[in-house]
């Protein structure tokens, strides 16, 4: 893989007179390099910019949220590493992600500027922003619960990105249900005695629909969730290709939840 895109990107960042800008520039160059061989998804510079912005903003803001609760716990660090691992980052990308995470922890990190730039660059695309928020929520819940300070900063982040408190609460419930459903579904495969009722309740939350919804409403909710998390569509809109595995995991969880509901309903 060529390194010229990275070098040019870093040089552009330094021209802006900002080290953080250089990091963003380097990743923009990285995605330009990838785009040379995969024009089907990365044929436009706007998509390349969104991918670079998503990556750099995600890890820096993740570090900022982790620090909001005071000392960054080992669980938070482990979660950040888990995201890096699931994205299959190479060593250079991993080190840059760590640098971004640490940059976000600093008191002078320009959170609002970073968020507004990200929202502008991604043109306020709801699905991209939702994926961003969902990943932050997963990281925030690494300790099993969100601290009040973290909750406040997440609400501020959501508001800045155009997400209401009501929608944030929905996403929060769905993320928690996805994680619990994933663990519970795996456990049920090994121990069928696990509470079917509790697992089914979480399945409905994963789809974002009430348990008394009609079959048509359940199917509509399922299709909406699959469309919002479809990896190919998200990448085409600017999601970094390194996030494909995470998007695939989400669609699998959504499908498993839908299948469980359908089976329970005898469909």
Image (cartoon, rainbow, N blue to C red):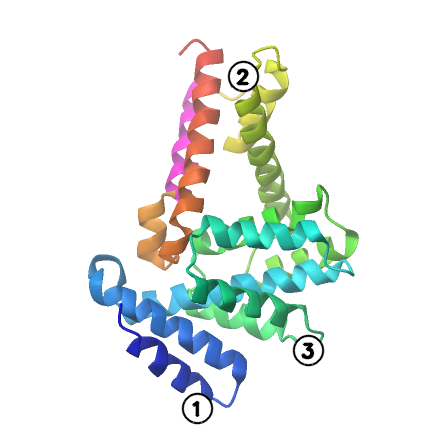
Question: What residue range appears in magenta?
Answer: 215-229
* Contact between labelled residues 3 and 1, with CB atoms less than 8 Å apart: no
Which of the two discs, 1 and 3, labels the residue nearer the N terminus? 1
Please tell me how crowded label 1 is: few (under 14), some (14-19), or many (20+) other residues with Cα within 10 Å. few
For numbered disc 1, what is the local secondary structure? helix
Residue assigned mark 2 = 190
Q: Does residue 237 appear anywhere in the picture?
A: yes
Q: How many marks?
A: 3
For the residues marked 1 and 3, what is the alpha-carbon distance in whole angstroms? 21 Å
For numbered disc 2, what is the local secondary structure? helix
For the residues marked 2 and 3, what is the alpha-carbon distance in whole angstroms? 48 Å
Which of the two discs, 2 and 3, labels the residue nearer the N terminus? 3
Question: For the stretch drawn in magenta, what is the main secondary structure?
Answer: helix
Q: Quadrant location of the N terminus?
A: bottom left
Residue assigned mark 1 = 15
Residue assigned mark 3 = 108
């Amino acid at each position: 893989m060529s390194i010229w895109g990275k070098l040019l990107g870093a040089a552009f960042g330094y021209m802006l007179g900002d080290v953080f800008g250089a990091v963003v520039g380097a990743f923009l160059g990285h995605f330009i390099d990838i785009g040379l061989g995969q024009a089907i998804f990365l044929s436009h510079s706007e998509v390349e910019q969104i991918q670079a912005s998503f990556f750099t903003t995600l890890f820096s803001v993740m570090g900022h949220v982790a620090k909001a609760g005071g000392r960054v716990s080992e669980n938070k660090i482990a979660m950040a590493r888990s995201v890096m691992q699931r994205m299959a980052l190479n060593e250079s990308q991993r080190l840059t992600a760590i640098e971004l995470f640490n940059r976000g922890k600093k008191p002078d990190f320009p959170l609002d500027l970073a968020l507004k730039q990200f929202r502008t660059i991604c043109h306020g695309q709801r699905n991209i922003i939702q994926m961003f928020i969902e990943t932050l929520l997963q990281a925030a819940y690494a300790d099993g619960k969100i601290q009040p300070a973290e909750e406040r900063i997440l609400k501020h982040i959501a508001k800045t990105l155009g997400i209401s408190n009501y929608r944030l609460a929905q996403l929060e419930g769905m993320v928690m249900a996805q994680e619990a459903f994933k663990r519970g579904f795996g456990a049920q495969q090994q121990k069928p005695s696990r509470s079917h009722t509790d697992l089914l309740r979480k399945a409905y939350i994963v789809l974002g629909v009430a348990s008394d919804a009609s079959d048509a409403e359940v199917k509509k909710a399922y299709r909406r969730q699959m469309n919002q998390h479809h990896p190919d569509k998200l990448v085409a809109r600017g999601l970094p290709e390194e996030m494909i595995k995470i998007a695939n995991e989400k669609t699998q969880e959504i499908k498993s939840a839908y299948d469980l509901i359908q089976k329970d309903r005898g469909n």
